[in-house]
Amino acid sequence: MTSKKLLIVISLIIFTTLIFSSCKNNEKKKEQTTNTFVEPRIFSVEEIYNFELLRSDWTKEQMDKANFKKKDNEPNGWTTYCDDNIEYIYYDWFESKTPEVIAVYGEYEGPRGIKIGDKFEDVLYKFPQEKDWKKSTFGEFYGTIYETEQWEPVGNVGIRNEEEKHITLHSKQGGPFYTIYFKNDIVTHYEFRMRNVN
């Protein structure tokens, strides 16, 4: 083999080695980026308002036109429009023009990608874990629930019985807020309450 050919072969080997090494480094960087843990952020009211099935212009008249089934729930004082996936509840005593409660039972993804069938632990860890909810006074995992008029962002777990739990994310004002319901630690439905109503 002539020295010229030998030089070309060596150059090709070096070039191939450099490309292979560069690809490996890029894969490593990509892997590191993918595996980087990002601390979950506190839930914000904007996440409720950005939900695609919640619009401020959805009046009862529009529900009628959209062919939702109407249920008059007198004497309780509210009206429900629903289909197989979602319920819109209007509190008649507020004379509210838009829904006060939106409950989702179907396959729509809620804020943080939460959907029916998700596991309790997976949902819980989509939010900051500043304290152990099992040891907190009101099941808080971040923030504090006040018994006064003062509010701050709060995430807490409530337990009805051995089978039923719920996670509630309060916005800064106390309302609106987002509640996710579980049976045997699986999401059954979730809802938005637009006011802090007892």
Image (spheres, helix red, strand yellow):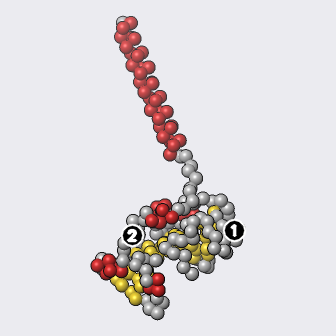
Please name whichever residue, 187 or 143, is drawn nearer the observer in this view of the structure. 143
Q: Earlier in the sequence, mark 2 or mark 1?
A: 2
Q: x and y percent of residue 87 in the render? A: 41, 78
Helix, strand, or loop for circle 2? Answer: loop
Q: Is residue 182 above or below residue 2?
A: below
The percent position of residue 99, horizontal first and vertical second, equals 42, 77
- Report the residue at 57% width, 63% height from top: 124
Residue projecting furthest to the bottom? 75
Q: Report the residue marked by disc 2.
A: 55
Q: Nearer the viewer, residue 25 or 12?
A: 25
Q: Quadrant of residue 62?
A: bottom left
Q: Measuring 44% from the left and 32% from the top, which residue is drawn there? A: 23
Which amino acid does the dot numbered 2 rest on? Arg
Q: Amino acid at mark 1?
A: Ser
Which residue occupies the extreme top position in the image?
2
Q: Which residue is mark 1?
A: 136
x and y percent of residue 85 in the render? 39, 74
Q: CA distance from mark 2 to mark 1?
A: 35 Å
Identity of the residue drawn at 44% across and 20% down: 14
